[in-house]
Amino acid sequence: MSVNISRTFRFTDGFKYSPAMLESEISNIVETINNANAGLLTWDNVKVDVFTLTGLIPIASGGTNSGTALNNNRFMVSSGGKIVENAAVTASRALASDANGLPVASATTAAELAHVSGVTSAIQTQLNSKAPTASPTFTGTITTPLTSSRALATGGSGELAVSVATSNELSFLSGVTSAIQTQLDAKAASSAIKVVSIGAITTSTTSFSTTSSTFQTTNLSASITPSSASNRVLVIACSTLRVAAAGVNGKATIARGGTNLLSANAFQVQDAGGATNTAVCMAYIDSPATTSSTTYAVQVSNNDGATSVTWGFNSGTQIMILAEIV
């Protein structure tokens, strides 16, 4: 139902309605609207120089039925038959409804609420499917970003990390019954020779003879290149040594780069009954302290400077073996 009431107040010849008169007229309008239970009160083209309206406009007529002054930024609520401002809501909080269905600030901040952005399903359901950080249990195959097949250890902050030891190396600890270093310290150093590589196996059937009393290099020689300067070289040389006259000493030695590695007399052969042929097999462990190619050779001599001494007599087989060892 709608009621439109219009009053026109004319002022002529300086005549002016008093405020009391205007109040009476407006009161009549309000009373007419209230009696008719009409909607909103509409004033059109009202001009008042001095006017004071007192009283409350009921809610049914579009008013608030309240004379309380308004503040800014408040929710309007119905309370006690009046439309009034609700209490101020805490700033920057997520809103929820209270027991009366009114919006109130929750404990969740706006920043915390923003973390929900991007969630695609129930958060608690997702959390329940995750393992706890304290004493978690797992089933099936667990995949980590760690390097595979390594022994595991904890890092500086207690995190899980891989060690330099492989899982295969870790397996060698199986069966150990006490501190490994303690056991090692109680053992004697091993004198066993380990062959790193066979550098050369050289043979010859070319005989070599000399009448010199100083060592002369024969036709039997070989070279090797050590892989480490700390490694050693095992030299083995074998053949026959002939001395052409009785009572003369025939000598044989191993030389590196022309330098005799044995004693001044080295290996000696002598037969008081006349010329003799003797099988000679020499072995020497050298420490060349190099990673460069190194040549070894057999040298022979005599003790009188005149009698013939022959290495590999009558084209006999000669052999030299060089092995790198540690």
Image (spheres, rainbow, N blue to C red):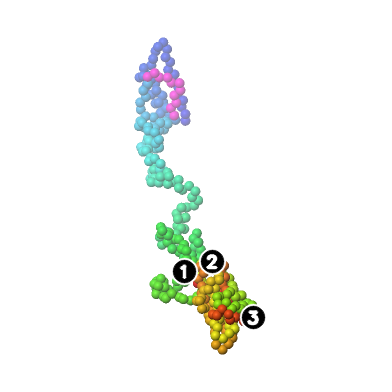
Quadrant of the rendered image containing residue 59: top left
In-image side of 163 versus 317 (left or right): left
In this rendering, the label closer to the viewer, 3 or 2: 3
What amino acid is found at the position of numbered circle 2 in the picture? Answer: Thr
Which residue is labeled 3 in the image? Answer: 315
- Decide: few, some or many residues near mark 1? Use Cα within 10 Å; few <14, some 14-19, many ≥20: few
* Residue 94 is at least partly visible in this image: no
Q: Secondary structure at mark 3?
A: helix
Q: Is residue 125 magenta?
A: no
Q: CA distance from mark 1 to mark 3?
A: 57 Å
Which residue is labeled 2 in the image? Answer: 291
Mark 3 and mark 1 in contact (Cβ < 8 Å)? no
The stretch in magenta equals 40-50
Say above or below: 48 vs 275.
above
Q: Residue 118 got which mark?
A: none
Say above or below: 214 vs 61.
below
Count of residue discs: 3
Residue most extreme to the bottom: 273
Q: Which comes before the other along the chain, label 3 or label 2?
A: 2
Q: Residue at 51% of width from left, 63% of height from top? A: 148
Q: Residue at 41% of width from left, 75% of height from top? A: 187
Residue most extreme to the top: 13
Q: Position of residue 267 (x, y in %)?
A: 53, 80
Q: CA distance from mark 3 to mark 2?
A: 34 Å
Q: Secondary structure at mark 1?
A: helix
Q: Position of residue 147 (x, y in %)?
A: 50, 61
